Image (cartoon, rainbow, N blue to C red):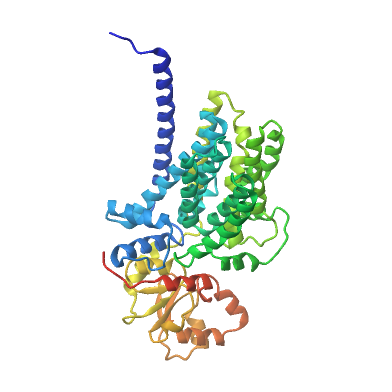
Amino acid sequence: MKMANPSYVLPMITYCKKKGIVFGIFLLIVCLQSVVQFSSNFAYGADGYYYAAQVNSYLTKGRFFSPDSSPVLYGLVYFSKLGTSIVTTNKIFISLLVGILFLSGYRLAFLVTKTVSTSILFGLLLVSSSFLPHFSFNFIKNLGGIVFFILFLTELWVLEQEEKTGNLTIYVRLGLSFLLVFFSHKITAGISFCFLLAWVWKQFPIAKIYRFGILLGLPLVLVGLAFVFPNLLHWSDLKTIVSEDIQFQLISPFYQYSKIFPEFILEQILFFLSPFVYLLTRSQLDPKPKTFYDKLFVLFFLLSLPIFSYTAFGFPFRLFLLVFIPGSILLLPTLSKIKSRPWVIVVCILLFLYQWLTMVREKNFNNQDYKLYSILIPLFQFPKDSLIIVHQGFDYFICYNKAGDAFHFLPEEKHKNRPIYRIVYGVSAAEYKKYLPKEVKIQYLPGFYSVLEEGKWQEFLKAIPAESKDRILDWRNPHTHRTNTMLRNESFKEPSKKI
């Protein structure tokens, strides 16, 4: 009987052992995420029921109520078929997505460093950041965009290291990963587009005149896609950036974030210093890795420019939240210096504990009182076909539970022939009596909510003093119209069809 060749068997055992460890960590991350996600029976975040309502709309009407092309939403739809509760399947999907982010980060780091321990540390650092729960609890499409962006960066790295330029498979993978990130979310789409343009100009293996033609044509093609597919990056989205107030504040985003979560100040310091840590190791790197890291170096500073007013969940704030991606990657050369196995194990354990802390601490940030909303819904007395104006979070909860047609913006021309009601927060009975005729019908609800006709609400706003109006008109009492981008998506709406 012929014995197996030890030179083949031993490496095979080692390979399987390493893969088993990585897969085990993936399962632990998914379980950890799931435990925190299922610590409440309700969804998390102001948009938790937006995603649930979108999935429900697609399942019952054959279309999203808000037209969208994100593969993340389609993933939620198809994953919902595995269970009976959309909220439950959404939570499992999100937990798996975070696990996949770990695997994506591991793959990128392994291709860059060729070291399993460093790759595991990087993957854990990526999913344990205090920035990530903002996406897993509030911005699920962004979370998908982050996963696909890491895949896109990985394919860019592979292509940059490839000496043979005729490998079609690599180009196909790069194109596919770019399309996934481009369709997932506008912010990550814009970033990946800039990376793609830089690669085309410097490294695409064709004559410069043709590269210049691609640089001109590619933006036009992508803008053209926005006329075919809803909610994609569009040239008019540049207005969002241009319209932001310029307000120089030294290290503003890090400082503002540390005020929200002072317990994570050490992480803020680590990421703030990551570009400088990278510069200390840069001279030891080969030219090709330097080029890759330098791009992330530039991205880091673009994401953390101290020129905006970083209010929670404004566009600059959401852009800044992505800084943990380049921040983590710039630490890779330093992480690769941790060679001791005991130290690697200790750091992994600490990162798991930190991941738990960040999730528990942040799960209620920008969360809604969905338990209260579930109590209020049976008390509604709206006429048939009413439009309900109510703040974000509550509106999606109403839609998901099929308790009415709700909206967190001012009514539009198309709504003029419908009964329109307003669910108000924070106005007392005494204030109503002071500024409205006593015959106006007002329904008072638990939780300092009240209901009246939209027309009467506008009369009330005109009658109250300016200081009272400033107090009342916050996010809990909607007072703005939908943006042009949102209105542009209306053209993609199709008639409902049961599927």
Quadrant for the C terminus, please. Answer: bottom left
Q: Is residue 361 visible?
A: no
Q: Is residue 86 above or below residue 460?
A: above
Q: Is residue 122 above or below residue 208?
A: above
From the viewer's perspective, is 207 left or right of 490? right
Residue at left 49%, top 70%? 486
Count of numbered circles in the view: 0
Relative depth, front residue between 342 and 201 = 201
Relative depth, front residue between 346 and 282 = 282
The picture quadrant where one finds residue 218 is bottom right
Residue at left 68%, top 38%? 277
Quadrant for the N terminus, please. Answer: top left
- List x then y, in percent, for residue 186: 52, 59
Q: Is residue 291 visible?
A: yes
- List x then y, in percent, for residue 170: 49, 41
- List x then y, in percent, for residue 126: 53, 42
- List x then y, in percent, for residue 437: 47, 91
From the viewer's perspective, is 366 left or right of 67? right
Q: Is residue 100 above or below residue 491?
A: above
The picture quadrant where one finds residue 41 is bottom left
Relative depth, front residue between 172 and 284 = 172
From the viewer's perspective, is 402 left or right of 230? left
From the viewer's perspective, is 130 left or right of 408? right
